[in-house]
Image: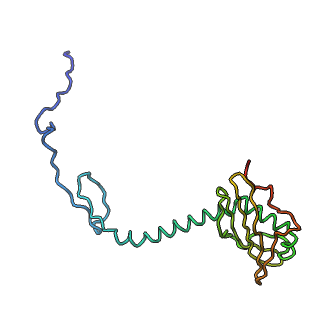
Amino acid sequence: MPPRLLPRICTTSRFIRHPLRPHRRTLIAAPSPNDGPLLSRRSDRALPEVPSSRKLWLRTLPIFLSIITLSTFAIFNYQKASSSIVNATLYALRTSEAGKRELGEQIYFRDKFPWIWGEMNQLHGKIDISFGVKGTKGKGMMRFKSVRKTRMGFFETLEWSLEMEDGRKLQLLDEVRDDPFKHTALQAQS
């Protein structure tokens, strides 16, 4: 029995692709909205018309920018609220006799999401913040101002006061009581 020959490869010109002659296919129009489901896709079909979104883009840009701005302010305020300066001032207010007398016990932030007003720049030695506080007896606004005059010096507390809702302003930093913030987290590292 003669050996079996391999099948002959068809070499007719209609099956050979010529590199200089592109393969011709007819273009299919893009489906319209009422054509029903598209069951097959061809890669050479016409692309659909893209509606101009310039009006939509111009309308949503202010919304996007306002969300980014609000988020930035919220992030920086959260950083201030969770800083050691705010924690130290709240602790000092809780242990202050005048603070306990006016606000009562359980002294904490007045609002659920506290807003810390002012500048907190430890690098340049300027701290001037105020925020709302409350206790079991009342509410108020605490202000704390401290500066560092030399590069490697200690922070010096200039003002530490509590303004009550009725307008009374109490100076929590007095000559009788020593500075509660001396040699705490507010000092510069030597």
Name the quarter where the N terminus is drawn. top left
Q: Is residue 164 left or right of residue 118?
A: right
Hey, which quadrant is residue 123 in on the image? bottom right
Quadrant of the image occupied by residue 113: bottom right
Q: Nearer the viewer, residue 77 or 49?
A: 77
Percent position (x, y) of residue 99? 83, 72
Task: Tell me residue 57's x, y (percent).
Answer: 38, 68
Residue appearing at x 23%, y 55% in the figure? 45
Q: Count every numbered label the image shows and give the total.
A: 0
The image position of residue 181, as x and y in percent, is: 79, 60
Please, which residue is most extreme toward the left here? Answer: 13
Question: Residue most toward the bottom?
Answer: 166
Give the vertical position of 9 relative to 1 (above or below): below
Left or right: 66 with respect to 125? left
Residue nearest the observer in this picture, 125 or 111: 125
Please, is residue 126 above or below residue 103 in the view? above
The residue depicted at 15 percent of the width and 44 percent of the height is: 22
Relative vertical location of residue 144 with respect to residue 186 in this rendering, above or below: below
Q: Which image quarter: residue 6?
A: top left
Looking at this view, is 172 or 176 the one in front?
Answer: 176
Most distant residue in the top direction: 1
Residue 178 in percent (x, y) is at 86, 63
Q: Residue at x 64, y 57 (%)?
A: 124
Question: In this picture, is 5 found above or below 154?
Answer: above
